[in-house]
Structures are given as structure tokens and as C-alpha cells.
């Protein structure tokens, strides 16, 4: 995929009026916001947004918890919609197609990670272009002040219309309902990608730490891969989910059960979205095996290297999936009849939904029905 990224500064284009929900500053919450988008350039598709999932990153970003938020901030990177217009150079999609957009909408195409298909680790001057909040490395922090995408802020899927480069729009398989497909674009890809990279296979014993939206998705994917799955949670109320999901559920502070599980896991995935202590879980890994952190993007509690060195174990991190992994996890979910548990909400209820996600592990994923932007009615 060695095409050029879309540089807005160099592209002639007309303007579309869009409606979304945006935060003005870290404490404003989200409210209705009217703005302009450029209409589809040569290799871009215009998408009528149907649904957008609510990811914990949206909350971190809206509140500037990663200290890089560009305001106004229109979040949303679990977007499913219908293609309504295509640029003259588009070959991958047609008007009427159901497509999905995940965490990124462009990358440099030339760096080593991009050439090997890992656009999500783009090492170009501005790194990848995030679906919202602009380039991962903004011009002010780029070498020589580069601004290869020609923009400083991007507006995400909490809006009625999205325009993206065709390569970054994925195909939604017909077997997936669009509202169920939405969270797979981030939560699904983020958990599938490390399981693929570290070679999780049928018969492996897999531990999932945390039982929120990411943990639920990870457990279902690992189970469908044929793994023997154990989920670790802090919530006794979630022990009852065991039978329905066909996984073992263990309380994180149940020392007896943790001791019994020592040195038994082939792979562990931490989905906890904040700073936490992974040391108790390192003990549960077999020799040579890895614990991968996908939930937190901040410093963890110090890792005791003795626990790692004595049995050549590793603790690693991983981002959301690349384009191929994201398409693969959509297809995998369709094929295996799995998907996130969701609750569809109206955009007007978004601030309340954020509050609930922040309060605890909401195991299902909120998905916004974007039709509610136009009508004031709730779904
Ligand atoms: Zn996300
Ligand atoms: Zn790149």
C-alpha cells in the first residue's frame, strides 16, 4: 500500500457542513457542535455515520488525561457507516457499502512499519493520523515542524458524516450487525492483534485481566480461538458471567486461587485502563511466556524483574490493530458469531454514559445511535 497520504493543504476540495458532539475544554463535557469537513478528495470516501462505539480512550482524550488533546475535541474511533460518495480515484469501496473506521485514518506509507503493514506503529514524521485529535506527532513536535497530513485536528465519529482515505475504511461483513461491529474496530482489534502477534492458539491457557469492554471482547476472541480462558476481575458481581461465556472467572484478590494457578498460563492480556500492578499476574505465566498490557497508556507500578528473569518471561505493550488485523478480527467475529455486548444510547446521553464507564467496569460497550443527532428522539 505505497500510495501517498492525503495532504489536506494540497487538496482542492469543497466543504461539507457536519454536526457532532464536542468537548471545548477538559471540563466542559460534550455538547452539540457544528463544524465543516472537507468533502471527499480523489482517494477518499464520504461516510454517513450510523453508529459509533464509546471507548475508554474517548474519555481520557476529552478530559486531556494524556495531556495532548486538541480542542474542540470530537471523539469517536469505532465508526460504522454507509459510503454515500467516493472520490474519482477510489477502487476499494462503492457507494452503498457498509464500512468501518477504527483508530487511524492515514499513515505515512513509506516508513518501515508502514511498509510491513503496521500503520499503527508508523514512524513517519507525524506518525499515524488519528481518527480524532489529529496526527499522533503534531507539527509542533515533529522534526523540522513537518505537517504531512496538512491538518492539526481531526474530528471523529461522534458526528453525522466522516471523510477518510479509502485504504483506512474496513469492510463490515454482512453477518455482523453494524452496531455490534462498531466496538470491534477498536476493542476487538486491540485485543485480537496481540493474541495474533504472540501466537495464541487452540489449547493454550489464556488469562484476561480486567472485565470491562476490552476484557469481555478479549475473553470471547480467545475462547473462539480454542483457548482455555480465565478472566480476572475485581467485581464479585461478574462471577455469574462464567457459564454464559464459557470461561473461568477469578477474583483478583483470591490469593488461594491465584496460588493454584501459578506458572500455568501461555499468554496473559491486561485490559485495565489505568495504572496497576502486574506483578501478581507475572507469577501465573509459564516460562518464556508474555503478559501484554493493552488497557493502560501510562506508567505501570514497577515491575519486579526477578519475576521475569528467573523464568525468562516478558511484560510487553501493544496498540490497537493494524489495518489487516482489524479486517481480520471483523471477519473472525462474523465467522464465529461473536461480538461485544452492547447497549445502544442516544448521543444526548453521552455524558451520563461516560460517568458510568468511569465509575466501574461497565462490561458491555456503549454504542451511540447517530440517527439521534438529527432527531431529538431517543432510540
Ligand atoms: Zn479505543
Ligand atoms: Zn509510516
Image (tube, grey):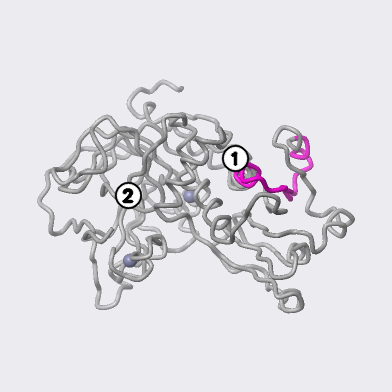
Residue at position x 50%, y 46% in the image:
55
User: Can residue 338 be seen here?
Assistant: yes
Q: As rendered, which of 346 and 198 lies closer to the eye? A: 198
Q: As rendered, which of 25 and 359 lies closer to the eye? A: 359
* Numbered-mark total: 2
**Per the image, is 239 magenta?**
yes
Q: CA distance from mark 1 to mark 2?
A: 31 Å
Of circles 1 and 2, which is in front?
2
**Furthest-right residue in view?**
256
With respect to residue 98, does 128 lie above or below?
A: below
- Which residue is identified by label 1? 356
**Per the image, is 310 magenta?**
no
Q: As rendered, which of 298 and 325 lies closer to the eye? A: 325
Q: Provide residue 213's location: percent of width, then percent of height.
A: 59, 43
Q: Secondary structure at mark 1?
A: helix
User: Can residue 360 be seen here?
Assistant: no
* Crowding at mark 1 (Cα within 10 Å: few <14, some 14-19, many 20+): few
Q: As rendered, which of 313 and 62 lies closer to the eye? A: 313
Residue at position x 68%, y 48% in the image:
227
- Which residue is identified by label 2? 168
Q: Quadrant of the N terminus?
A: bottom left
Residue at position x 77%, y 44% in the image:
248
With respect to residue 290, does 89 lie above or below?
A: above
Q: Provide residue 379's location: percent of width, then percent of height.
A: 46, 22
Q: Taking 18 as reference, is 237 left or right?
A: right
- Image quadrant where residue 271 sits: bottom right
Pointers 1 and 2 in contact (C-beta within 8 Å) = no
Q: Provide residue 312's location: percent of width, then percent of height.
A: 70, 75
Going from the N terminus, do you reach mark 1 or mark 2 first?
Answer: 2
Question: What residue range appears in magenta?
Answer: 220-240
Residue at position x 43%, y 43% in the image:
78
Q: Secondary structure at mark 2?
A: helix
Amino acid at each position: 500500500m505505497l500510495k501517498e497520504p492525503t495532504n489536506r493543504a494540497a487538496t482542492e476540495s469543497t466543504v461539507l457542513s457536519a454536526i457532532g458532539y464536542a468537548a471545548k475544554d477538559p471540563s466542559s463535557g460534550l455538547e452539540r457542535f457544528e463544524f465543516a469537513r472537507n468533502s471527499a478528495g480523489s482517494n477518499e470516501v464520504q461516510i454517513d455515520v450510523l453508529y459509533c462505539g464509546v471507548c475508554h480512550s474517548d474519555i481520557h482524550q476529552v478530559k486531556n488525561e494524556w495531556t495532548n488533546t486538541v480542542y474542540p475535541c470530537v471523539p469517536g474511533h469505532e465508526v460504522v457507516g454507509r459510503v454515500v460518495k467516493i472520490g474519482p480515484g477510489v477502487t476499494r469501496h462503492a457507494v452503498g457499502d457498509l464500512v468501518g473506521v477504527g483508530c487511524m485514518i492515514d499513515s505515512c506509507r513509506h516508513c518501515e512499519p508502514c511498509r510491513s503493514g503496521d500503520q499503527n506503529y508508523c514512524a513517519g514524521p507525524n506518525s499515524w493520523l488519528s481518527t480524532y485529535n489529529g496526527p499522533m506527532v503534531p507539527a509542533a513536535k515533529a522534526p523540522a515542524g513537518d505537517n504531512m497530513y496538512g491538518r492539526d485536528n481531526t474530528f471523529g465519529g461522534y458526528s453525522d458524516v466522516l471523510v477518510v482515505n479509502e485504504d483506512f475504511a474496513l469492510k463490515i461483513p454482512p453477518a455482523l450487525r453494524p452496531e455490534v461491529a462498531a466496538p470491534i474496530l477498536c476493542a476487538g482489534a486491540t485485543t485480537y492483534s496481540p493474541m495474533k502477534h504472540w501466537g495464541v492458539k487452540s489449547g493454550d491457557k489464556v488469562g484476561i485481566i480486567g472485565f470491562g469492554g476490552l476484557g469481555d471482547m478479549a475473553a470471547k476472541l480467545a475462547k473462539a480461538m480454542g483457548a482455555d480462558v480465565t478472566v480476572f476481575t475485581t467485581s464479585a458481581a461478574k462471577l455469574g458471567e462464567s457459564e454464559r461465556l464459557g470461561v473461568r472467572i477469578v477474583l483478583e484478590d483470591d490469593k488461594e486461587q491465584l496460588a493454584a494457578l501459578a506458572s500455568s498460563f501461555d499468554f496473559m492480556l491486561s485490559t485495565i485502563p489505568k495504572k496497576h500492578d502486574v506483578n501478581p499476574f507475572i507469577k501465573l505465566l509459564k516460562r518464556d511466556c508474555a503478559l501484554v498490557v493493552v488497557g493502560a497508556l501510562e506508567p505501570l507500578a514497577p515491575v519486579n524483574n526477578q519475576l521475569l528473569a528467573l523464568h525468562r518471561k516478558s511484560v510487553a505493550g501493544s496498540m490497537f490493530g493494524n489495518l489487516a488485523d482489524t479486517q481480520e478480527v471483523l471477519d473472525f467475529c462474523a465467522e464465529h458469531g461473536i461480538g461485544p455486548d452492547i447497549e445502544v444510547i442516544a448521543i444526548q446521553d453521552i455524558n451520563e454514559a461516560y460517568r458510568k464507564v468511569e465509575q466501574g467496569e461497565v462490561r458491555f460497550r456503549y454504542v451511540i445511535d447517530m440517527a439521534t443527532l438529527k432527531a431529538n428522539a431517543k432510540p
